[in-house]
Image: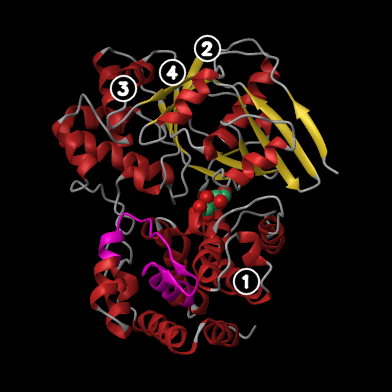
Amino acid sequence: MHKIERYRSTYSKPGIGIVHLGLGAFHRAHQAVYIERNLERHGGGKWGVCSANIRSNRALVDQLRMQDCRYHIAEYKDSEHVALREIAAIQEVLYAGKNGEDREVLLERMANPDTRIITLTVTEKGYCLSPATGQLRTDDPGIAHDIRTPHAPQTAPGLLVEALRRRQTRGLAPFTVLCCDNMPDNGSRTRQAVTQLAAAQDERLAAWISETVAFPSSMVDRIVPAMTDASFETLRQLDCEDSAAVIGEAFSQWVVEDHFPQGRPDWEKEGVQMVADVHPFETMKLRMLNGSHSLLAYIGALAGHATVFDAINDPALLELVRCYMEDEAMPTLDMPAGIDLNAYAEDLVARFRNDSLQHRLHQIAMDGSQKLPQRWLSGTQEQLARGGSISCVALGIASWIQYCSGQTAQGSHEVNDPLRETFHELHAHRQGEALVDGFLGLVDVFPAGLVEHAAFRLAVQEAHRVLSTQGLQAALANVTHNNNH
Ligand code: CS2
């Protein structure tokens, strides 16, 4: 029997003070919920949201328009305890970006003097930066387009630059840009993308942006799987018929660098941690949670599992995740007083065991080329420098290489990654050591300082050799043995 708590919105219609780029499930289940609670506390106010999809999903925009932008989130602690919340924080939804007809409306909304904050969840690849070097990819087709056609941009950095240009031309103060994607130093990375793109268009605009725009960093955390037919069926059991609804876990965390020269909502009242330095929290979350997720995704997929729940209930994978967190991630973390990493690790295992989230491993596996640097590789570089172990990550990389062939023992799967074609070429023409060398040669993924390390190359080669000649069980046994687990 479910214990359902239901919450309805009661506040009066707020003004729009925040524009969000990337109207995906994560935004609807995370930032929008904090904003909802804040609006509810104040009975309305000036911090309502305009949310825009800038790449895909026109259907969601249409759906939300039909329901006055209101939707539900079901927050599951476990299958017995769920809170069903109505969210009314979003005041306007737009479909912009490439071929999106609302682009001009969006740019004017961003340039509106009432807009003080732009938040973003456009995924790692949406910033068009090289994951390894952090530099803007001017060869990216979207960025190349935005350099040629700055007034009709297609990318997130392009929209930010054009909206800032309009504000500068009109003598308005800039907005604050708050990145909510899983990248290290995500504020600085966003600044890098925006200023580099602006400099390619207009040096004076770039200088104004550098001097006046704040790009605070933030760490965001809530597990929000993509919706499936099965999740909509689950919602029906709660009497919730809403095709814009989302399902997430009960846990939620948001740590934000407190640098908002144009003002901000009093988010700390909703449990947001407003801090001077987000870096330690970001690194902890990326390496511990996301790093474990990626391990479960590639190794779990090779083992024939479908979801995080299935994978974490496999004793060998549970052991691997514990071993990774304890021996390869935790030693690289330097946390402020009061943060207990052992407790954090155990909480993560409990969250992965949530029996109500059908979090598909293939979803987490996508865009590995964008995710691995911050989840595994930066920590591995630190481990190598201190002589620490790197066996779990080495097996993770070997499994990722296998996964990128598009084949597991269970059959074929789609490889969803900006480097998909390159992976395909590598698998078509190489095998064994040459295949591994080919992958380690991807300069946008593997930093030079890491691949030059003989011990790193050797560990990945060895893990790949055992995996492909003796199988996953032997490879897993090797890792736990190497790490003395
Ligand atoms: C996941 C994240 O898809 C992925 O790569 O690791 O979306 C993860 O669920 C969130 O970062 C949790 O906060």
401 with respect to 327 (left or right): left
Please tell me how crowded label 2 is: few (under 14), some (14-19), or many (20+) other residues with Cα within 10 Å.
Answer: some
Specify which label sits upstream in the sequence, 1 or 3.
3
Q: Is mark 4 within 8 Å of ligand 1?
A: no
Which mark, residue 326? 1
Circle 3: residue type: Glu
Specify which label sits upstream in the sequence, 2 or 1.
2
Please tell me how crowded label 1 is: few (under 14), some (14-19), or many (20+) other residues with Cα within 10 Å.
Answer: some
Q: Nearer the viewer, residue 457 or 402?
A: 402
Q: Secondary structure at mark 1?
A: helix
Q: Nearer the viewer, residue 123 or 274?
A: 123
Q: Secondary structure at mark 4?
A: loop
Question: Would residue 25 be counted in the magenta stretch?
Answer: no
Task: Return the residue at label 2.
Answer: 15
Quarter residue 165 falls in: top left
Q: Secondary structure at mark 3?
A: loop
Quadrant, the N terminus = top right
Mark 1 or mark 3, whichever is nearer to me: 3
Circle 2: residue type: Gly
Circle 4: residue type: Thr
Q: CA distance from mark 3 to mark 2?
A: 23 Å
Q: Secondary structure at mark 2?
A: loop
Mark 4 or mark 3, whichever is nearer to me: 3
Mark 4 or mark 2, whichever is nearer to me: 2
Specify which label sits upstream in the sequence, 4 or 3.
3
The residue at the far top in this view is: 12
Q: Name the residue at 76% across, 40% down.
A: 82
